[in-house]
Amino acid sequence: MKRQWLVCAGALVWSSAGLMACGDDTVLAPQDAGPDASTLADAAGTDTGLADGAEATDSSLGGDGDAAAPPPTRLLLSYNGFGGQAELVSFALASKSVDGRFVYPDSLGGMTVTTPTNPWLLEQGLDIVDRLDPLQPWVVRSSWNVALGDYAADAGYSSPYSDPMGVIVGAGSKAYVLRYTRNLIAVIDTSSVVDGGAPLKTIDLSGQLQAGGDGYVEMTAGWFNPANGWVYVLLSNIDRFNVSTYLGCSNTSPTIVAIDTSTDQLVSLGGDAGADAGGGIVLPGFDPFGPTTMVYDPPNNRLLVLEDGCNQTTTDGGEGALVRREIDALSFSDGSVTKLLDLTANPFPVGLYYIDQHHVIVQLDTAYMWDPATTTLGAAIPNAPQAFDVDGLGNLVGVSQTFGSDGGATGWSITSVSADGGVTVLGSQDPFYVDGGSAGDLFASGYVAGAQLWPAR
């Protein structure tokens, strides 16, 4: 796969975080999907024992000895159905069963994000950001509409949906919603109890636009630094007009900008990208895409960024060589930017998962271990799931589709895979409703868009 845009059955289908599939991907369930697997959880119908709007505190997530027990570990799976529905599935690792789900009518699909205090669901085609219940993470406790009315059909490469891509929680009760197809960040109050509520304010990044782009900064990932109270935002700055079966190179570069959360103003990082005082730092790669493309490396005090790259154009206008697919580092110690790993000979990048300063998992066509102190990608991890998250022990916990001897899909396997490829099967069933496996639903094809562990590691 060379880019996230693929044509399936005449429609433009875009994966926000990982796997895509075209055609008839009907999934059959070899086993029962577990207790209550066919029950659609009502977002307002289950009482968790928390007051509406109550945030999960450090104590409720396992702080001191007098605190309540932490929530059980769950794998939150996002499934985007081609029939116009998407769903969030909560798979409990201890009981090895689905213990809740939330189905919503989003033709673009959605994704989950986990922050230290809450899991979140981003309904990307509906412009909805949901704060989920920490104890029952399929239950929506508060939601915000981040459409904001800044859609302009004639303003460059615009889209009817703002495509929320990430939620970055800063100090206090403010969170920053990154909107991929807009130039305004939505700032929300995470302590409020609202149903489709409005953001508190917006932060305009249009001053970071670069000549040669498509009129949008393509904000894609972020990280909050508690040491200085700044949110760092990764901007892709591509030209989506220059996309066919591949993404063509443009005279633009990805940048990292910073926002002071005490003032919600851009702060200068000393770079020269953009016209206003919040000039970002330029990265040498091209097109970082998705919320798992930027991670913090604490021992080295730097951000690592995974970039997809782009294809040069040949003299006759055709597809040329792939360039700028790499992992870059931004050092906070001296502000330097370094290309750490060249990936132009490797398959399409999906995400980075940080374990420690010598162990980072790079997800391409499968998972690879990489030591950032070296310039060579390590070996593939055997039996890696198709979509996964990494637990606190460095295991890949996720889901893979299974196939029969005739090549047909037979279900899904939920596994925990160690760094050396050892497999622990957590479930062999079809956890999804909208693919037709669990309850015979009509929406019988789609793709897994992501996997997140909650509580966050």
Image (cartoon, grey):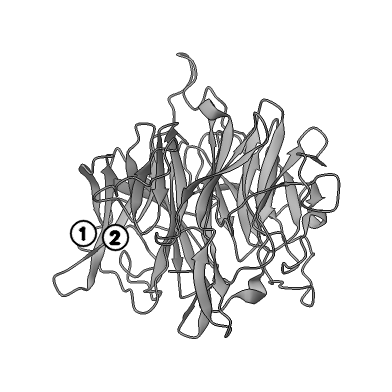
Q: Is residue 16 visible?
A: yes
State the residue at coordinates (76%, 61%): 210
Q: Nearer the viewer, residue 298 or 121?
A: 298
Q: Is residue 291 placed above or below 65 in the rendered structure?
A: below
Estimate the x, y position of residue 432 in percent, counting from the top left: 36, 61
Report which residue position mark 2 lands on. 430
State the residue at coordinates (77%, 68%): 151
Estimate the x, y position of residue 332 in percent, counting from the top left: 65, 32
Cα distance in 3D space between marks 2 and 1: 7 Å
Q: Going by the image, does 293 lie left or right of 240? A: left
Q: Nearer the viewer, residue 340 or 292?
A: 340
Furthest-top residue in this view: 65
Q: Secondary structure at mark 2?
A: loop
Q: Nearer the viewer, residue 219 or 276?
A: 276
Report which residue position mark 1 lands on. 31
Furthest-front residue in this view: 315
